[in-house]
């Protein structure tokens, strides 16, 4: 298999040298790789490096409150009741639990995520796949064939950080990972598992918990009514997603701002009114006393305490919708202080009323504000699932780009903030899954147990990847790495051991979701990689192109053919299949690859990059059409006309900067050479014009895959049934390429993998 930077299909390399000088003027450089040039567009900047104005930062911080913090913000509704399911044994147990909550909130959401993990984003995107992608950029440990020449520009591949620091430990760890196939597979499968768990966490919404509070208000609300109301609310919530993060954020943020103001104010009131001395829980001695007095019961109760961090992973997963600074501002300025006051106030209330722990939140609300607080609580709990819904959209977008998720439609919902996306198929599947969980479990006890396992597992996985980033990429001081592992890592492992204790009490649910999602992602990625390597190994060589040119049985018909393929490097093998079965080629033949770039719009004059396929007599070209995520294809923009105009301009430049043209500057017979070249140029331009007038046809390379003869039963099941089922029931190539159906012809070929 040839390297991605190689020049395929007889493309000429025109290097910049002394011969490029003419009349003391430096002529433009022609890159020797279509792949490299196809990823470079002026105006592309990393989202994380934009000099954004403070007004925009504050707007994003405001929006993030409605998107990111619903889950962690509503945790005061159920943490104390989940921690003390059998009641409070001793008054000081409340101080021990409060101390655990305060230090857990400070260590994990604040220090770990807000001040450390957010900086491990991959060009502005967060989540498990972003960490995996970041590690794969700095070490050759990826199983996904994404490290190609054009990606070095598109994804801002930085092989070394600006400081260019060298670390023996970093080099040693990098070498061990690169040389261990077991380590590569482990990292990949851990990534799939963590991603699946996080998506599964998005299914375990607290909506039923919110509506369950209605039971406290009126006995008329039976369990069946609660379940059906929850289902109706879920449907409305997911239908609302199509408006996009921008509008959803502006709609939900005021509600959650009121919520945080309420819980902070009530917390201050309860601290003053009931027991101001509760602030002595800042002393970690009460944690030691709590474990000494309760032993195993204290360890089991950690499964309830960790729920105070539910949704913390969304701080990282949703950073692509916002910015690091906006998340830090909203967390430190609003969310963290409000949660600290809320939990401290509830603990103060429980010091005087330990018998009311089963419904701590509503019982601790002062009478005059009970009903306003109740309405806001219900609305806030409904919004709580928004954090992981938005995070799921970002994760699916990342996994799709890495070939780890079936084709789905990615809708960019904002022209101002490029990371805000909406995935219709995933949105409706999440809705169905949420309704299924609500209808099946009916109570919040098992949902809470399932929550714990999903939350802590993803946190632990994030910490593991972060340690690799700290050592290999950041090259942090080893003392910092050890401190992180001993303090934050050990705390998360203790919590993980506790939540696993409740595996049979609903904790199995996220593992079921993870198993289903992992199966889908593994099947798609495995066959994706097999197809990728098959196409690269079987792409047509320059010799094969010359054989086609010399074949007298192939006739040329008038017209322009645009042959679409996902392969950017070289001529796809399906073209050979096409020529063998249809021995006719249009007078001008262009291989088109549509490439999406992570910028809002690509200037029209930079839309297309061309290369000629030799020999010239074929009138065949390779083209990469580059689009931003807000560009409209084939509707307002006359795709074919602009392509033809750019193709003719390329032909003019091709002759102008050809080696013959450069040599003619020193040739005594310059006029003769120029005359021959001008004649050839006019002939090629005329051929394109005539082909365009005769009409254009769009040919799509549609590949079917089957397991090779003699393949094992597992491979046959995966390729022939599982993969093809996913492919047939999801979007096809014509949707991805946005090809007009009236002039579309599919060219099929079967790959035996």
Image (tube, helix red, strand yellow):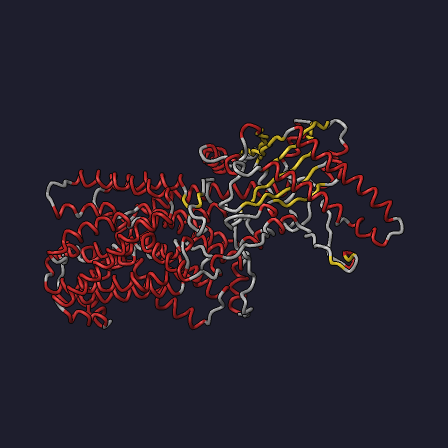
- 418 and 109: which one is in front? 418
Q: Quadrant of residue 480?
A: bottom left
> Would residue 494 appear left or right of 267 to someone viewing this image?
right
Q: Can residue 355 be seen in this snapshot?
A: yes
State the image coordinates of residue 458 (x, y, percent, origin top left): 36, 55
In the picture, the quarter occupied by the C terminus is top right
Q: Quadrant of residue 748?
A: top right
Residue at image location 55% in from the left, 39% down from the top:
637
Q: Can residue 148 be seen in this snapshot?
A: no
- 84 and 575: which one is in front? 575
Number of marks in the image? 0
With respect to residue 565, does 482 lie above or below?
below
> Would residue 551 appear left or right of 232 to someone viewing this image?
right
With respect to residue 639, does 449 lie above or below?
below
The residue furthest right is 668
Residue at image location 35% in from the left, 66% down from the top:
111
Residue at image location 64% in from the left, 47% down from the top:
1
State the image coordinates of residue 188 (x, y, percent, origin top left): 47, 51
- 81 and 209: which one is in front? 209
State the image coordinates of residue 440 (x, y, percent, origin top left): 25, 39
> Would residue 650 appear left or right of 458 to someone viewing this image?
right
State the image coordinates of residue 576 (x, y, percent, origin top left): 66, 33
> Would residue 586 appear left or right of 635 to someone viewing this image?
right
- 691 and 708: which one is in front? 691
């Amino acid at each position: 298999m040839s390297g991605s930077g190689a020049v395929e299909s007889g493309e000429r390399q025109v290097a910049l040298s002394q011969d490029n000088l003419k009349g003391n003027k430096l002529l433009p450089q022609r890159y020797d790789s279509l792949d490299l040039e196809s990823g470079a567009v002026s105006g592309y900047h990393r989202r994380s490096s934009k000099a954004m104005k403070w007004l925009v930062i504050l707007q994003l911080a405001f929006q993030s409150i409605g998107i990111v913090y619903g889950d962690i913000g509503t945790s005061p509704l159920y943490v104390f009741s989940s921690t003390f399911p059998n009641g409070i044994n001793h008054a000081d147990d409340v101080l021990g639990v409060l101390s655990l909550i305060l230090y857990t909130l400070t260590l994990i959401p604040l220090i770990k995520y807000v001040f450390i993990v957010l900086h491990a984003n991959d060009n502005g995107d967060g989540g498990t796949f972003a960490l995996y992608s970041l590690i794969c950029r700095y070490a050759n440990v990826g199983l996904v064939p994404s490290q190609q020449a054009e990606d070095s520009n598109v994804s801002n591949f930085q092989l070394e950080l600006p400081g260019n620091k060298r670390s023996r430990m970093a080099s040693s760890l990098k070498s061990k990972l690169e040389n261990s196939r077991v380590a590569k597979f482990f990292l990949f499968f851990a990534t799939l598992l963590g991603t699946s768990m996080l998506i599964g966490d998005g299914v375990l919404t607290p909506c039923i918990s919110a509506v369950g509070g209605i039971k406290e208000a009126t006995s008329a609300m039976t369990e069946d009514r609660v379940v059906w109301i929850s289902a109706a609310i879920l449907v409305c919530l997911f239908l609302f997603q199509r408006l996009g993060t921008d509008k959803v954020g502006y709609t939900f943020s005021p509600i959650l701002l009121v919520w945080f103001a309420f819980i902070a104010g009530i917390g201050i009131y309860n601290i003053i009114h009931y027991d101001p001395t509760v602030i002595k829980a800042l002393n970690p001695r009460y944690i030691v006393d709590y474990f000494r007095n309760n032993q195993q019961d204290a360890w089991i109760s950690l499964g309830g305490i960790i729920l105070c961090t539910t949704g913390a992973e969304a701080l990282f997963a949703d950073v692509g919708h916002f910015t690091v600074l906006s998340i830090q501002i909203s967390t430190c300025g609003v969310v963290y202080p409000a949660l600290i006051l809320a939990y401290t106030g509830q603990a103060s209330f429980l010091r005087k009323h330990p018998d009311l722990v089963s419904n701590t939140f509503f019982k601790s609300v002062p009478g005059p504000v009970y009903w306003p607080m109740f309405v806001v609580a219900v609305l806030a709990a409904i919004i709580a699932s928004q954090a992981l819904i938005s995070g799921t959209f970002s994760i699916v977008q990342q996994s799709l780009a890495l070939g780890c998720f079936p084709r789905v439609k990615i809708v960019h919902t904002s022209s101002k903030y490029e990371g805000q996306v909406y995935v219709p198929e995933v949105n409706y599947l999440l809705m169905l899954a949420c309704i299924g969980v609500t209808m099946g479990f009916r109570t919040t006890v098992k949902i809470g147990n399932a929550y714990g396992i999903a939350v802590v597992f993803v946190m632990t996985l994030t910490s593991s990847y972060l340690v690799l980033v700290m050592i290999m990429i950041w090259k942090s001081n080893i003392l910092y790495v050890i401190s992180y592992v001993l303090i934050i890592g050990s705390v998360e492992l203790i919590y993980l051991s506790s939540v696993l204790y409740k595996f049979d009490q609903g904790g199995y649910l996220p593992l079921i979701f993870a198993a289903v999602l992992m199966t889908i992602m593994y099947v798609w990625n495995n066959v994706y990689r097999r197809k990728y390597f098959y196409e690269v190994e079987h792409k047509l060589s320059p010799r094969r192109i010359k054989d086609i040119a010399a074949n007298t049985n192939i006739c040329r018909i008038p017209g322009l053919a645009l042959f679409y393929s996902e392969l950017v490097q070289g001529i796809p093998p399906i073209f050979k299949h096409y020529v063998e079965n249809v021995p006719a080629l249009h007078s001008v033949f262009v291989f088109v690859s549509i490439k999406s770039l992570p910028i809002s719009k690509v200037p029209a004059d930079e839309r297309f990059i061309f290369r000629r396929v030799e020999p010239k007599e074929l009138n065949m070209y390779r083209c990469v059409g580059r689009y931003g995520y807000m560009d409209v294809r084939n509707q307002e923009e006359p795709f074919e006309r602009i392509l033809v105009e750019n193709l003719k301009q390329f032909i003019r430049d091709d002759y102008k900067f050809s080696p013959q043209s450069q040599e003619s500057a020193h040739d005594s017979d310059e006029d003769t050479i120029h005359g021959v070249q001008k004649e050839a140029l006019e002939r090629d331009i005329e051929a394109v014009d005539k082909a365009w007038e005769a009409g254009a046809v769009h040919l799509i390379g549609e590949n079917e895959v089957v397991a090779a003869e003699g393949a094992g039963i597992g491979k046959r099941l995966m390729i022939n049934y599982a993969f093809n089922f996913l492919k047939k029931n999801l979007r096809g190539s014509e949707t991805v390429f946005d090809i007009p159906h009236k002039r579309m012809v599919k060219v099929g070929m079967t790959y035996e993998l």
